[in-house]
Structures are given as C-alpha cells and as structure tokens.
Amino acid sequence: MYALVEKLSNEIKSFLDQRDSVALSVASTENETPVIWKILESVGEESSSELFWQFEMPFVDTRSYVESIFNSFRQRHEMVRLLQPQNGLVEWPSIPEELFGSPFQTVAQLKKLMTFSRELLPSESGFLSIWIFYPFEIKSQFEFAGFLLELLQHEFPFPWLHGLRVIFREGATDRTMSTFVDGMPRVSRIEVDFSPSAMSDAIEHEIDDESLPLARRMQGLLMSAGMDFSHRRYEQALDKYQILFKFHGLNGDRGQLACALNGIGEVQQAIGQQEAARDSFLAALIPATEGEHPAIPVLTNILINLSNWYEQHSQWPEVEQCTTELYQLGALQRNPQLKVIMLERLGSAQYQQGKQDEAIASWSASHHVAYELELKPQQPSVLKRLRDVYLEKRDFEKAKEYNEQLNELAQGGYHG
C-alpha cells in the first residue's frame, strides 16, 4: 500500500516541479477517488512553495459546479483574511467585486478567479497556485470534459495559466475524458490502480518484505486486518488485530494500540460478542486519550463505535455523553458533517430521556449548521424530527413551518 501511495505522491510532485505541462489528469473510479484525494491533500500539506485549492464537490453540471467552486474559494479566502492580522501576517487582498457581478459565475470568470489566486502567493517567483478539480461523483463525463476543455484553452507561447497548475479527475472507465486528454496540448496523465485487489496485493507484499522496518510492516498488517474485516473474514481479522495489540502494547505506540483494540471490538461486535465489544471499545479509549497529543481521528472512530453500541442497547445517557464529545471533536477537526450528525443524535438521546427542550435545542442547532453550510443531504432527517416534536407540543405553527421546509427541500427549492 505504501508503495502505491509513494509512487503516486512522487508522480504528482514531479508534475509540480516541471514546467512543460500545465495540467495533470489522474484517472480513478469512484471507489478509488477518496484514496487519491487524501494523497493529493497530503502532497498539499507537505508543500512549502505551492498554494492548493481543492474542490471535491459532485459535478452535476458546469453552472452549479462553478458556483460551488466560487462559494468554497470565498469561504476559505475570508477565513484566512480574518486570521492573518491575528497572527501578524499581511492580509490577503479582497476578491475583485466584478467576479460576482453576474447572476451566476461562468468558466470565464473562474479563469479570472484562478488568475487572482496568484496574487495570494508570497512571491511571483518560485511559487505556484494549484487548482484541483476532483469531484467524488461526476454525473456527466462529457460535460465535465467540456468544462475542462473550456477552462484549459490557452494560446502559445504565453498561456493564461502562467503561475498556475491544474489537476483533475479522469473517469477510469469512460473513454470520453481519455479522448479529451489525448487531444490537449500540455496535459499529462497518470494512470493508477487502487483497486481492492491491487491494494491487497501491495499490502501483503509489504507485510512479507523483511527488508522493511517492522513498524511499517505492522502498519500494513493493520490495513490487511481492516480489509479482512470489510470482507467478513472475521477470524483472520481478529488474529491480525491481536498480533497488533501485543506488538504495540510492548512498543508503547498509544495510537496504534487504540486502533488494534478498536478493531478487536468491531470484530467482536460483528460476531455477536456484544459485551466483549463494548469492553474493547472502552479499553481503546485509554491509549487514545493519553499523552499531550491524542490521536483525534482514532478517538473519533472509537467514540462513534461506542455511541452506536449504546444506541443499539438503548443506553441513552451514555449516547448523550458520547455524542457530546463527538460534537466537540467535530468542531476541533472543522468537520461540519460530523457536527450536524452528532447534534441530531444528541437530540435523539435527550428526547429518549424526556429532555424535550434540550432535544429541540440540539436539533435546531443541527439544522442551523446544515443550513449555514448548505449541507442539503443532512437537512431532511432533522427537519422531520423538529416537525414531529412540535406536533407533540401542539405548536402547530412551528410544525407547519418545518413541514413546508421539508416539502420545499423535496422539490429541490429549499436550502435552509
């Protein structure tokens, strides 16, 4: 697995270092896309000479996609501008108002926005602004290809993309984009294989490679255990997690020890050992919370498993405690989806305990966050809860208000 990741990371870095191609196509299926997205994020985090702008939102059509890019860019731009003076940094210039003058943004305006992003670089020399268009879902490969064709059109010898680089997703099973890439000058391509079979083979190779450091082979074993679990090979998964538990118990790696215990709990729950699963999840919390820098993603997964376990067993005070902590972790990680989901679950736990007013407050907060951040898929469930609880309270005006919002949302016209 590391070999696959390292190979793709190095190829992306090589593209950023060269000066012949202005764009890079990275092919992936929908299942492979999240893995590649994380690799792109990691390359961006490691870079000191490039400013990355990444857009993973679904591509439905060009107009809505460009609009969502503008909204995302503006939110990040405004956030950075607010923080810069507090940290003694020079404040970024404002986005030119003319880019927001029309009823909706066009590809031509997007080009101007990308050109403007060069002004945010520390220097015109030696720095690049990297724009990554990598939708997790593409409704029409043909229209996405058309969007990119219009975006990347340039005239030699001085393309408008000077100081910019573009990385985009190519559908691995659709020849539409391949034909487009083949016909475009100064566009490179990377073909990768992150299929389950390729990853499994790479992981097993690393586990068996005695030339690699033992810690790296153990990391491969953790991935292999996870793949066994996902394919319901529970006995193999449990054996591997127990090896990891013993190994990390000896070497003192708290984060990896917590991962092993959490994995053991997941297997135990899957095979019906409910009490043992709860005990494993609780045991995993100890190493996950120790030390000055606890492993936040690991802790999040453990608390989600515990919260699910308590909910399945109707232990509502414990659900309330877990979801409160998960909401705080969502805020810490700037994960709005987790905040919305945990606020809704918190409200449910409070409602089950007869805390109706607290439940309404939690559900209203969940609805507010989903509205403010335009998280449309998260809205129907909490709107139904608010409608129904106000019906119980016989507050028919409030119930009607939330029902109308639900109806508008079902028709595609309500966003908050």
Image: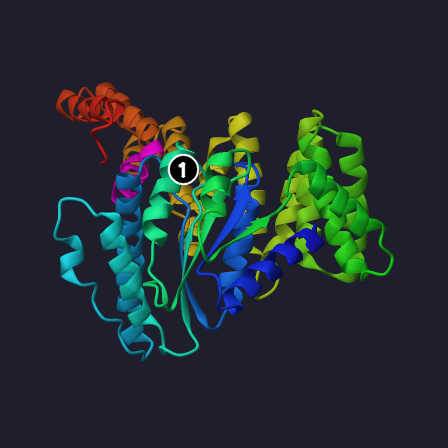
Q: Position of residue 354 (x, y in %)?
A: 36, 28
Give the image quarter of residue 118.
bottom left
| Quarter of the rendering containing residue 204 | top right
162 up-or-down from 393: above or below = below
Give the main secondary structure of the magenta stretch.
Answer: helix
Percent position of residue 315, x then y: 51, 30
Relative to 226, 132 lies left or right: left
Give the residue at x 24% y 52%.
108
- Residue at point 79%, 52% (across, down): 206
Q: Position of residue 284 (x, y in %)?
A: 65, 47
Mark 1 — residue?
341
Q: Is residue 58 visible?
A: no
Label 1 amino acid? Ile
Check residue 303 for magenta coloring: no
* Along the viewing direction, whichever of 14 and 339 lies nearer the viewer: 14
Is residue 365 one of those drawn in magenta?
A: yes
Q: Residue at x 76, y 37 (%)?
A: 237
Picture quarter containing residue 119?
Answer: bottom left
Q: Quadrant of the C terminus?
A: top left
Q: Which residues are magenta?
A: 363-377
Give SS at disc 1. Answer: helix
